[in-house]
Amino acid sequence: MSKVTVQVLGADHPVVLSGVSTVADAKAELSVPNHAATIEGEPAADDQELFDGDFVDLAPAVKGG
């Protein structure tokens, strides 16, 4: 389990989460299950493993095109 920093688009500041293993865990902890994720600026799937010190951005998924 890791300690990571997560920035949710629209939030005033990032939060630090401890005890999360995957992107899905972080999304569940913050109640944003449909947000798209990046880790260190690279797209990340829900099953992507998180490591201590990772910086995760979460933004609402964009629909349409």
Image (tube, helix red, strand yellow):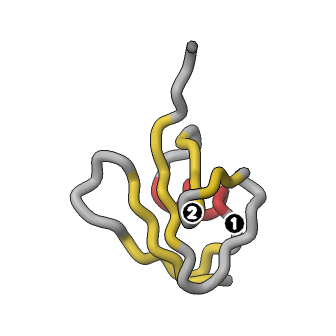
Task: Please tell me which residue lies in front, 23 or 44.
Answer: 44
Q: Position of residue 9 (x, y in %)?
A: 36, 48
Tell me if residue 28 can be seen: no
Label 1 with label 2: CB-CB less than 8 Å: yes
**Residue drawn at 46 percent across, 57 percent down:** 30
At mark 1, the secondary structure is loop
Give the answer, above or below, for where 26 lies relative to 64.
Answer: below
Report the amino acid beneath label 1.
Thr
Q: Residue furthest front?
A: 41
Q: Residue at x 60, y 81 (%)?
A: 19
Residue 60 visible in the current orientation: yes
18 lies above or below 41: below
The disc placed on residue 26 is 2
Of the pair 57 and 34, the residue shown nearer to us: 57
Q: Which mark is residue 41?
A: none
Residue shown at 66%/80% (left/top)? Answer: 51
Crowding at mark 1 (Cα within 10 Å: few <14, some 14-19, many 20+): some
